[in-house]
Image: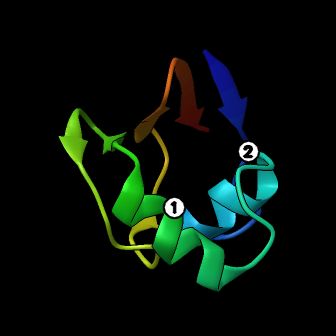
Amino acid sequence: MKEIKLKGEYITLGQVLKLEGYVSTGGEAKSFLAENTVLVNNTQEQRRGRKLYISDTIKIFNDEYKII
C-alpha cells in the first residue's frame, strides 16, 4: 500500500488521480471515475471532488493508497 502525505486538511479524489498519474486534468478525472471502479474506504466513488482525510484508503485497479 502506497502512502500519500497530506499537506493540508484534505485532498480531493481528483487530485489523487492526477498525483498518481491516472489522469492529467480534472475533466479527465470525471471520465475516468465514470468508466472505472475506484473504491474509497471500500465504497465505490464517482465524485472527483470527494474530500479525502487522514486514514482514508483508495483502491484504483490493483493499486491501494492510504492518506497519512
Dividing the picture into quadrants, the one containing residue 38 is: top left
Q: Nearer the viewer, residue 61 or 59?
A: 61
- Between marks 1 and 2 in the image, the one whose residue lies nearer the viewer: 1
Residue receiving disc 2: 5
Q: Are marks 1 and 2 in contact (CB under 8 Å)?
A: no
* Looking at the image, residue 46 lies above or below residue 16: below
**Residue 7 pos. (x, y %):** 77, 62
Is 51 on the left-hand or right-hand side of 10? left
Which is more toward the observer, 43 or 53? 43
Label of residue 32 in the image: 1
User: Looking at this rendering, what residue extends furthest in the left direction?
Assistant: 43
Comparing 10 with 40, the one in front is: 40
Instruction: Residue type at mark 1: give it.
Output: Phe
Few, some or many residues within 10 Å of mark 1 (<14, 14–19, 20+): some
Q: Is residue 6 left or right of residue 12?
A: right
Using the numbered discs, state the Cα–Cα distance from disc 1 to disc 2 in whole angstroms: 23 Å
Query: Hey, what amino acid is under mark 2?
Result: Lys
For label 2, the SS is loop
Q: How is the image coloured?
A: rainbow
Q: Quadrant of the N terminus?
A: top right
